[in-house]
Amino acid sequence: MKSLVILFSLAAVALSNAAVTITSRNFSSATVGVPILNANGTLANNAATFWSAGVLALPQNFSWTSTTATEVLSFFTPVAPTAFTGAAPRLSTTATLQGLFNAGQSGEFGNSTAPVTTFVGQRAYVLVGNNIDLDSSTEIAVFDSLSNFNAAGATGLGSQTLNVTTAAQVLFGTVLTPTQQPTLANAAFTQGVALSAVAIPETSTSLLGALGALALLRRRRN
C-alpha cells in the first residue's frame, strides 16, 4: 500500500511540473517565412539577435500602434526563465540560416517561476530582440503564433512547434521587402520583419498626424 501511495505521489509531481520543449521557427522553406531584417532590409546580425517564446499579459487598453519595445517586454513572460536573462536562444549562427530560427527551448510548466496556468491554454507569442537578452533589448519584433500553449502529456513531458512564418503574424515590427536573402538554396523570401523600438502607426493615423501638422503650419503663417 505504501508503495502505491509513493507511485501516486510521483505521478502528481510529474503532472504538476511539466518539462516541455517549445520549438519556434520563422520559416518552413526557402520561400515561406519572414526573416529578421535590419531597417534597410538586409539580414540581421544573428550573433546579436535572439528569440524567445512566451505569453503576453496585455492590459485592456493596450495598443500596438502607440507603445514601445520596453513596454511590450514588461508584459512578456518567457517559457524558460533563462531565456529572459542570459542563455537566450540565438538566431541560427550558421551561414546558411542568417535571419532565421528553427530551434527549441526547454522549460518547466509548474514551477514557482512559471506555474502551469501561466502558459497552458494561453496564447503563445514569439519575441525577437536586438541584444544578448530581452532585458537589454531596445528593439523587438513580436509574432502571434495563432495557437495556445498545450498541456504536457500524462508523463509530464511535452513538445510543441510554434510556426511564425507569415507577415500577417507580425504584431510589432516593420514588415519589409528583403534586400538580401539568406544563403539557403533558392531562397526567395518576399517579406521580412525589421525590429522596432516603436510600432509604426497605421496609415490612417499617420495621415491624420500629417494633416494636423499642415494645419498648424498654416495657422502660424496666418
Image (spheres, rainbow, N blue to C red):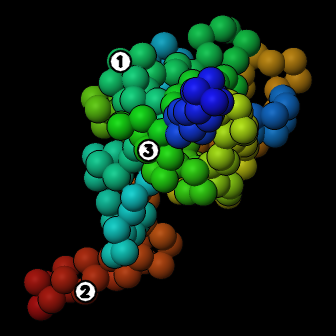
Nearer the N terminus, badge 1 or badge 2?
1
Q: Residues within 10 Å of mark 3 (few under 14, many from 20)?
A: some
Identify which amino acid the numbered label 1 is placed on: Gly
Q: Contact (CB < 8 A) between labels 3 and 1?
A: no
Q: Regarding mark 3 in the picture, which secondary structure is present there?
A: loop
Mark 1 or mark 2, whichever is nearer to me: 1
Q: Position of residue 94 (x, y in %)?
A: 66, 8
Pick whichever, 117 or 101, lies toward us.
117
Mark 3 or mark 2, whichever is nearer to me: 3
Q: Position of residue 13 (x, y in %)?
A: 53, 33
Q: Is residue 174 something that shows in the picture?
A: no
Residue depicted at 35% across the width and 37% down the height: 112
CA gap, disc 1 to disc 2?
A: 49 Å
**Residue tagged by mark 2?**
215
Residue depicted at 67% across the width and 40% down the height: 152
When the figure is inspected, residue 170 is found, relative to residue 35, above or below; the finding is below
Q: Contact (CB < 8 A) between labels 1 and 2?
A: no
Q: Regarding mark 2 in the picture, which secondary structure is present there?
A: helix
Nearer the N terminus, badge 3 or badge 1?
1
Q: Which mark is residue 7?
A: none
Q: Position of residue 132 (x, y in %)?
A: 37, 20
Q: Which mark is residue 86?
A: 1
CA gap, disc 3 to disc 1?
A: 21 Å
Mark 3 or mark 1, whichever is nearer to me: 3
- Indicate the quadrant containing the C terminus: top left, top right, bottom left or bottom right: bottom left
Residue farthest to the right, as pictured: 186
Q: Which mark is residue 115?
A: 3
User: To which quarter of the image does residue 212 belong?
Assistant: bottom left
Nearer the N terminus, badge 3 or badge 2?
3
In this picture, residue 166 sits left or right of residue 22: right
Identify which amino acid the numbered label 3 is placed on: Pro
